[in-house]
Image (cartoon, rainbow, N blue to C red):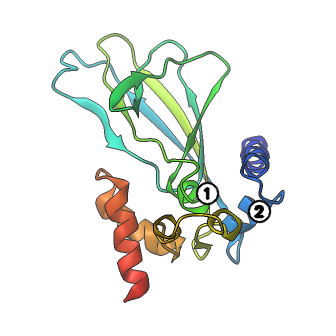
């Protein structure tokens, strides 16, 4: 419950930063049954040949906001920044906040989902606990109108409007591919 509350507090801070009314992002995630929240625990055992095996291939997360608690002694998480992979060192008593594809769409690209991966390590097991605050399955996702009004015409049309469950079905087969083809496929579905 505290993690879910933290995610909602962060969403309100994002609203403030974007110039949206407080609660806009939470409402956008609601659908008819409210947002979904889940947790996944991952364990990456030590690997004697880390140059041959990746812990988790590069991807962006499909959902909204991810609160990641990492094992404090063994690293491995990397994000792609300016074409370079950068280590995200674990810090004791801290969360890594990751943004998913849905926040990119709703913010009309002002926030970007982060491509990340996990590299295997030779020494020690890495454990992480990821908590996902995602839209409800029937939530309709689209750029916030207030963020589209003053955009150039080509930017207004970049992000599609879709039902989150439909995006997740597409994502299941394209998780480890670039996000842009997923957005294009959702646009094509919407116009069909």
Please tell me which residue lies in front, 49 or 168.
168
User: Residue 9: image x %, image y %?
Assistant: 79, 45
Q: Is residue 177 above or below residue 123?
A: below
The crowd level at tag 2 (other Cα within 10 Å; few <14, some 14-19, many 20+) is some
Residue in the picture at 49% in, 47% down: 113
Judge from the rendering whether residue 29 lies leftward or rightward of residue 154; answer left or right: right
The residue where tag 2 is placed is 24
Q: Is residue 104 above or below residue 99?
A: below
Judge from the rendering whether residue 168 lies leftward or rightward of residue 131; answer left or right: left
Q: Is residue 169 above or below residue 12?
A: below
Label 2: which secondary element: helix
User: Residue 31: image x %, image y %?
Assistant: 67, 74
The answer to which of marks 2 and 1 sits earlier in the sequence is 2
User: Residue 108: image x %, image y %?
Assistant: 57, 60
Residue in the picture at 58% in, 50% down: 110
Q: Is residue 175 above or below residue 98?
A: below
User: Residue 57: image x %, image y %?
Assistant: 30, 39
Quadrant of the rendered image containing residue 36 = bottom right
Judge from the rendering whether residue 163 lies leftward or rightward of residue 24; answer left or right: left
Quadrant (top left, top right, bottom left, bottom right) of the C terminus:
bottom left
The crowd level at tag 1 (other Cα within 10 Å; few <14, some 14-19, many 20+) is many
Find the distance from the CA under tag 2 to the CA under tag 1: 11 Å
The residue where tag 1 is placed is 107
Q: Which mark is residue 65?
A: none
Label 1: which secondary element: loop
Q: Can you name the residue that lies furthest to the bottom here?
A: 192
Quadrant of the rendered image containing residue 69 = top right
Give the total of numbered labels: 2
Viewer-nearest of labels 2 and 1? 1
Residue in the picture at 70% in, 78% down: 32
């Amino acid at each position: 419950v505290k993690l879910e509350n933290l995610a909602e507090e962060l969403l309100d801070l994002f609203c403030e930063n974007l110039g949206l009314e407080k609660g806009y992002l939470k409402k956008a995630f609601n659908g008819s049954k409210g947002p979904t929240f889940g947790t996944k625990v991952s364990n990456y055992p030590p690997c004697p040949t880390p140059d041959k095996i990746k812990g988790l291939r590069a991807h962006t997360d499909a959902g909204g906001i991810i609160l990641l608690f990492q094992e404090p002694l063994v690293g491995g998480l990397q994000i792609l920044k300016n074409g370079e992979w950068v280590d995200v060192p674990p810090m004791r008593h801290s969360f890594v906040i990751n943004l998913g594809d849905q926040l990119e769409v709703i913010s009309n690209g002002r926030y970007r989902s982060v491509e990340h991966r996990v590299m295997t390590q030779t020494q020690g097991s890495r454990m992480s606990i990821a908590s996902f605050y995602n839209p409800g399955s029937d939530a309709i996702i689209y750029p916030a109108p207030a963020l589209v009004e003053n955009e150039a015409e080509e930017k207004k049309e970049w992000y599609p409007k879709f039902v989150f469950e439909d995006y997740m079905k597409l994502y299941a087969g394209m998780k480890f591919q670039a996000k842009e083809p997923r957005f294009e496929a959702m646009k094509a579905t919407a116009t069909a």
